[in-house]
Amino acid sequence: MQITIIASGSGGNATLFASRGTRVLVDAGVGPRVLAQCLAAAATAGALGSTSGSTSAWTPDAIVITHAHADHVGVAARYNKKHKIPIYASEATARAAHLGDPERVRLFSPREPFAIGALTFSPRPLPHDAAQVALVVDDGARRAALVTDLGEVPPGLLEHVAGCDVLMLESNYDEDMLDAGPYPQHLKRRILSARGHLSNAQACALLAALPGGTHTVALMHLSENNNRPDLALAAARDALLGKRARLLAAPPRGPLVLDTAPPPGAARAPLAARQLGLFPGM
Ligand SMILES: [Zn+2]
Ligand SMILES: [Zn+2]
């Protein structure tokens, strides 16, 4: 299974999962042009599996929406209308967001697995100020977890993501930067709350408790005002010390391509400072 992180952060979120001819976009929080450009770049890089090279070949088979915030639901309704593809969402999300033609909206239960082609999605509710889910995506051979937009790590989440080959985990803010930053008090309180976002320290607590089996960790949804990739990566590297995992920070705009198959040599290589230099500005 190949994963293409197209965008991550408050400016928009979209991640494509591709395996054995099935391509599913999770969240559609970026404009159609950015989405098309990133899908084209990912296709050129071979991350979408076999395509004919035409633009329509880059269109996903379906879109899964994690929750009704604009940075995640963005262009879902337009995709529904233009490409006539199904949009999957929980009932609460479908009620709170406009997802386009209801005939193509498919409801899922936030605790029950559902399949789209070769991929099985296992959701789990997350504490956030909208009905939100973590997703474990399984193609029968490998598993990847996408966990963003949560105010705290709820009971059972660690077990839900344990053993996933790839973990994409929110590391939204550095507490000192948020405290000293320009946001108004009510916004700081919202981010800090148990239904807000996950701090670097909270992400690290989960990473430190993560059992073996995860070969790649991508830090997601980093705030551009209240965090720095080097801070988030340094903290996560410490938390993962002794675990054999590759560590990355997702940039606000991708594409960043991850493979659920272990990278050659990665299983033997401890977390290294070289990972810090993967993206500009780190
Ligand atoms: Zn978000
Ligand atoms: Zn959100």
Image: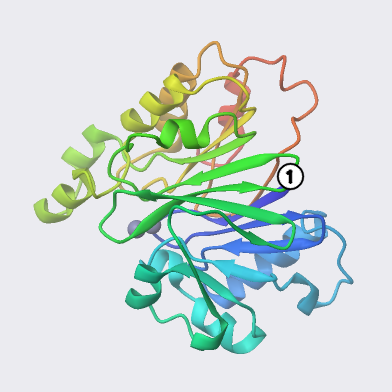
As drawn, is 25 to the left or to the right of 56? left
91 or 127, nearer to the observer: 91
Q: Can you tell me which quadrant of the image ligand 1 is in? A: bottom left
- Which residue is most to the left? 185
Tell me residue 135's x, y (percent): 51, 50
As drawn, is 164 to the left or to the right of 172? right
* Callout 1 crowding tier (Cα within 10 Å): few <14, some 14–19, many ≥20: few
Q: Can residue 68 be seen in this view?
A: yes
138 or 259, nearer to the observer: 138
Secondary element at tag 1: loop
- Which residue is most to the top? 242
As drawn, is 178 to the left or to the right of 217? left
Residue at x-position 40% and y-position 82%? 98
Q: In this view, does 239 lie above or below 24?
A: above
Residue at x-position 63% and y-position 14%? 270
Residue at x-position 17% and y-position 48%? 188
The amino acid type found where label 1 is placed reads: Gly
Tell me residue 3's x, y (percent): 67, 50
Tell me residue 132's x, y (percent): 37, 57
124 or 232, nearer to the observer: 124
- Quarter of image, res 229: top left
- Residue pointed to by mark 1: 140
Counting every numbered tag in the picture gives 1
Q: Can residue 224 be seen in this view?
A: no
Tell me residue 175's x, y (percent): 24, 34
